[in-house]
Image (cartoon, rainbow, N blue to C red):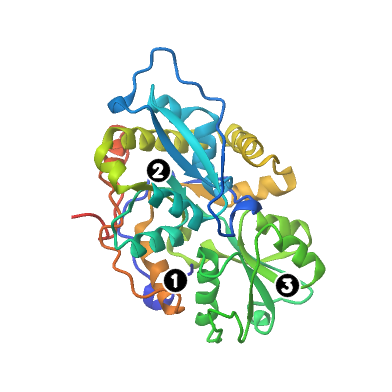
Amino acid sequence: MPHAAGHRRATGHRTRAALAALPLLALALTACGYGSQTDEGGGPAKIAAGAKKIEGLDSVRIGYFPNLTHATALVGNREGVLQKELGGTEAKYSQFNAGPSEIEALNAGSIDIGWIGPSPAINGYTKSRGENLRIIGGSASGGVKLVVNPEKIKTESDVRGKKIATPQLGNTQDVAFLHWIAEKGWKVDAQSGKGDVSVVRTDNKITPDAYKSGSIDGAWVPEPTASKLVAEGGKVLVDEADLWPDKKFVITNIIVRQEFLEKHPKVVEAVLRGSVKTNAFIQENPAKAKAAANAQLKADSGKALPPEVLDPAWKSIRATDDPLAATLDAEADHAVDAGLLEKPDLKGIYDLGPLNKVLKAAGESPVDDAGLGVE
């Protein structure tokens, strides 16, 4: 979500030196919709013969979306990086269609660690009064755009009076768009979406057809939906990255069940080590990483992305180990301002000790929790 002037805060933390412009994207199937259905799936990685289990644990259950905004998980799965770090402890993967269902699985103990967006992480943390999850690392920044029909909307002021889609009431992009509207001085009822702009909550997999039919005039959406709309003749009016300091804002975090973190800290460190190594692989081998991510998307969802969608989407997201904590704090404030969330106490939502231990061992700079870490 964009920063209001009063919310522009220096991040005050050192980002990993190579926040590389990476390819990531969000498969349209998964960005919206409630429900707890998951699809078990895994990459080709096998446990090496004779590999030892970490802390005697048979397996760790990992959740993610088949989206390229979750490219660290996709590539880490496909290339076997996460499994290699886990040794004889098996990485078992589950794919989710939306943040609420992943939080539900985490709370139920069905998964241990997950890749997830900031809004579900905030909601999950606040609803459990800080008892169920911790954010332990970053994964991705960027990859969100306002794409419009250029025949109807030529300037930002033209958005007033138009119908603009977001993926889901209260989701990360919905709050970002509501905040952008408010900064324009326009009024919209957050719950109904009615006002100076009509905010139409639309499942990402339906949004391209809604655009083609003319039932919406544009959409504030993650990749690859944004690139799909551009392929249909849409124009990027706003790249959300341009609204944030240093063009960085969190789109994907890594979370863990608190109980699992307490019982199996070495397993958590192994997953984080795999994440850091996967991000380095993505940065150093972008073409191979893009192919691996798309192959895992096909394995998980049954359909790979075509080049005309994959290539531009891949360019718009950056992999990062830094959770960009200050931007998550600002995003929470935006949700409060929109009337979608009561002022949350996010103190303790981060535990970056294990990640900073991994980064130090890798010769990287530590990342900061913006004052929202555990005591």
Q: Amino acid at mark 3?
A: Ile
Please determine whether, in this image, residue 328 is positioned above or below residue 19. below
* Percent coordinates x, y for residue 217 in the rendering: 73, 73
Q: CA distance from mark 2 to mark 3?
A: 37 Å
Work out whether residue 190 can be spotted: yes
Residue located beneath label 1 in the image: 3
Q: Residue at x 35, y 58 (%)?
A: 325
- Which element type, helix, strand or loop, lies under badge 3? loop
- Quadrant housing the C terminus: bottom left
Quadrant of the rendered image containing residue 154: bottom right
- Between 363 and 232, which is closer to the camera in this rendering? 232
Q: Nearer the viewer, mark 2 or mark 3?
A: 2
Q: How would you rate the neighbour count of disc 2 (Cα within 10 Å): few for under 14, some for 14-19, many for 20 or more?
A: many
Residue at the (25%, 38%) spot, across then down: 263
Q: Which mark is residue 113?
A: 2
- Mark 3 packing: few (<14 Cα in 10 Å), some, or many (20+)? many
In this rendering, the answer to whether 374 lies above or below 268 is below
3D distance between C-alphas at marks 2 and 1: 29 Å
On the image, the x and y values in percent for residue 133 come to 33, 52
Name the kind of residue labelled 2 in the image: Ile
Residue type marked 1: His
Judged left or right of residue 98, residue 246 is left
Q: Secondary structure at mark 1?
A: loop
Q: Is residue 307 above or below residue 200?
A: above
Secondary element at tag 2: strand
Q: Nearer the viewer, residue 190 or 2?
A: 190
> x%, y% of residue 183?
50, 80
